[in-house]
Image (cartoon, helix red, strand yellow):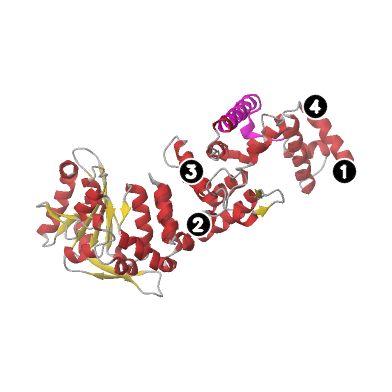
Amino acid sequence: MQRRAVSELLRVSPVADDLARRFEEAGHRLALVGGSVRDALLGRLGNDLDFTTDARPEDVLALVRPWADAVWDVGIAFGTVGCLKRAGDTGQEFQIEITTYRSEAYDRSSRKPEVAYGDSIEEDLVRRDFTVNAMAVALPEKRFVDPHGGLEDLARRILRTPAAPEDSFSDDPLRMMRAARFAAQLDFTVAHDVFAAMKAMADRIEIVSAERVRDELNKLVLSAHPRKGLRLLVDSGLAGHVVPEIPALRLERDEHHRHKDVYEHSLTVLEQAIDLEENGPDLTLRLAALLHDIGKPRTRRFEKDGRVSFHHHEVVGAKMTRKRMTALKYSGELVKDVSRLVELHLRFHGYGTGEWTDSAVRRYVRDAGPLLDRLHKLTRSDCTTRNKRKAQALSRAYDGLEERIARLQEQEELEAIRPDLDGNEIMEILGIGPGPEVGRAYRHLLELRLEHGPMERDAAVAALKEWWAAQE
């Protein structure tokens, strides 16, 4: 582990040492810290470097402005100055954040941390979230600073807090979500006392702003092991305050009794969706997979034959998805896309073994729009049955649907389905001006296009005139 760290530190040392010398000459101390040291030890250090210093933010600005290629001070209220530095020899770009030694705590009635500056690196490290993030390398001498056993915890792959977990989580309750996020990102285990504090203090997460909660949830969902992090959120009670729709799934069996419960099914669907990703983590797809069945608890019905049904859970689930994502301050576009996928995730099950008409296939493509590829992945991921014959039959059926879509797209350019006449042509043929009649005519022609496919112009004109005559 230390050999990997030396190699990583050597790679960034031209920039790090140069910066450290500037601080040293000005009478200040500088150290690589936190996640940068952790990632160097894990052999995964990128070009984002975190430093800590005894210099106050205004002094940091004065030191880096002549040195960096770009400087930003949006975090200066919290003691952080950011800058961009291009390495002269390699041309690599380093994103650098320099934070003054500090301690921060939450007032129980405030959503924002109070910042107080410290005077020593040891004081700074004790306020950090976990011991694996409370290590530093003092520069330029490269002295390893690890007062809380972070190196040992890193080797054991365990998350502990430098201070008592109750104190750490009281200072910043978001750290409880970070525990789940790091467990998911690094495949680490949370120490027993840390988990106990998370359970006892879960309600404190409500003091944290929705934006910060959302950002942590995104990092967790986009991680390498999201199931592990989500389980931790649910088991600790945090999810009940952040995304209560997820723990609500734990006791809801699906209508076929094929899964332990809908909660486990949803986590499996998420993992299967991840396996189908082609261009890296896809937040839209992953959120849709996680949330696709959240409408089931509200739609559960016990039928006379003993079965359990969840009729229209996709419609209810789409509404619940919109509400929850809006509360977490997601962008309007992402809310729309994820809720649309939730709404459409059952549509394929009406396909059977290929009974859909070409018209139904066109509507499937049109309703999915630019989400079609994600809908393909979500639908395939939603099959978690242990019955291999049934799973193979569903896969073959969806293969068949995709083949039909491909054929129709080649023939008809389904992605850009439009009526065979545009608005100007409609007005010219009917001898009318702009108004609601044009919209109604356009929608009628669109329905004909979806139902029958492309029409020759003469046939489209005749169909329009026939419809118009019926309106009089």
Q: CA distance from mark 1 to mark 2?
A: 53 Å
Q: Earlier in the sequence, mark 3 or mark 1?
A: 3
Up/down of 220 relative to 446, above or below: below
- Residue 263 x %, y %: 51, 50
Q: CA distance from mark 3 to mark 1?
A: 52 Å
Q: Are dots 4 and 2 in contact, CB under 8 Å?
A: no
- Residue 29 x %, y %: 14, 60
Amino acid type indicated by mark 2: Pro
Is residue 140 toward the left or the right of residue 337 in the image? left
Disc sitting over residue 268 in the figure: 3
Q: Earlier in the sequence, mark 4 or mark 1?
A: 4
Q: Which secondary structure, mark 3?
A: helix
Up/down of 281 relative to 53, above or below: above
**Label 1 Cα neighbours within 10 Å, binned few <14 / some 14-19 / many ≥20:** few
Whether residue 400 appears in magenta in the rendering, the answer is: yes
Q: Earlier in the sequence, mark 1 or mark 2?
A: 2
Disc sitting over residue 471 in the figure: 1
Amino acid type indicated by mark 4: Asp
In the image, farthest residue toward the right:
472
